[in-house]
Image: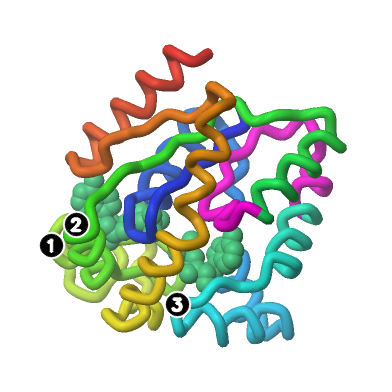
Amino acid sequence: MKLLVMGPPGAGKGSQARKLIRDFNLEHISTGDMFRQSAERGEELGKKAMEYINDGNLVSDEITNRIVKKKLFEEGANTCFLLDGYPRTVTQAHALDDMLQEMGSKLTAVINIVVDKEVILERMVGRRVCRDCGYTYHTHFKPPKEEGVCDKCGGELYQRPDDKLESVRNRLRIYEEKTRPIIDYYKGRGVLVNINGMQSFEAVYRDIRKALRDLT
Ligand code: ADP
Ligand code: AMP
């Protein structure tokens, strides 16, 4: 299975991706995680990317396509994967098509998580992430047992700089302008599935599983 999970920032892509990769044994390819991890390793690419990320802007198509292509070709055509946060522009969607064609592969489904703007803002400003294992919490909807401490590994929870209100507003504007048009790009191909993301974590996951069953 080769999946793509789409949706505005804060829609719940990462939260749902975590369950999907576990249940279907998929390689999780999150471009946001790749940039953050590269920055933590002190690499030039990551440090440069963070300048864009912290203000809520997109990293260039050229850099983003390059890291995804490297990863996909390292994994090979037989690897089942879930792309999370990529593509984010129509140019990236074309590049992904070229990569998959070159590998003799294609997408099984594009899952589009639909969430209203008000819900997004609430989710993003409350998001907290573990510095050590990357597990995601929410101050109201998914609080850790002990404030500021990861249930999974005991690591410190922090607020991503791009989850501050000003960055979030910029990210939403960019989503509307650059990313939303991709939905139409995939609509005509019979692989797009719209999922109501304004439900509990469990209900969203149940709907995704049902949609995948119907498709395959
Ligand atoms: P994305 O990967 O799309 O940016 P996340 O999965 O990180 O989104 O979710 C954003 C925030 O919203 C997180 O704090 C997460 O815990 C919370 N969240 C995600 N899905 C739901 C849901 N169905 N109900 C309530 N909160 C949610
Ligand atoms: P995410 O972790 O998916 O919320 O991504 C965090 C940030 O990383 C985004 O706001 C962008 O700045 C950058 N980023 C992630 N994926 C992409 C992409 N496909 N294209 C450009 N920038 C990206």
Residue at (21, 69) in percent of width and height: 126
Label 1, secondary structure: give it: loop
Compared to residue 73, the image places residue 23 above or below, namely above
Query: Label 3: how many residues lie within 10 Å, few (<14), some (14-19) or many (20+)?
Result: many
Mark 2 or mark 3: name the one nearer the start of the chain. Answer: 3
Relative image position of residue 144 (x, y in whole percent): 21, 63
Q: Amino acid at mark 3?
A: Gly
For the N terminus, the image quarter is top right
Label 3, secondary structure: give it: loop
**For mark 1, what is the residue?**
140
Relative image position of residue 66 (x, y in whole percent): 78, 62
Can you tell me whether the CB of the residue at mark 3 lies under 8 Å from the nearest atom of ligand 2? yes
9 within the magenta span: no
**For mark 3, what is the residue?**
56
Compared to residue 22, the image places residue 160 above or below, namely below
Q: Amino acid at mark 2?
A: Val
Q: Is residue 154 left or right of residue 189?
A: left
Marking on residue 119: 2
Q: For the residues marked 1 and 2, what is the alpha-carbon distance in whole angstroms?
A: 13 Å
Residue at (45, 68) in percent of width and height: 174
Q: Amino acid at mark 1?
A: His
Q: For the residues marked 1 and 3, what is the alpha-carbon distance in whole angstroms?
A: 23 Å
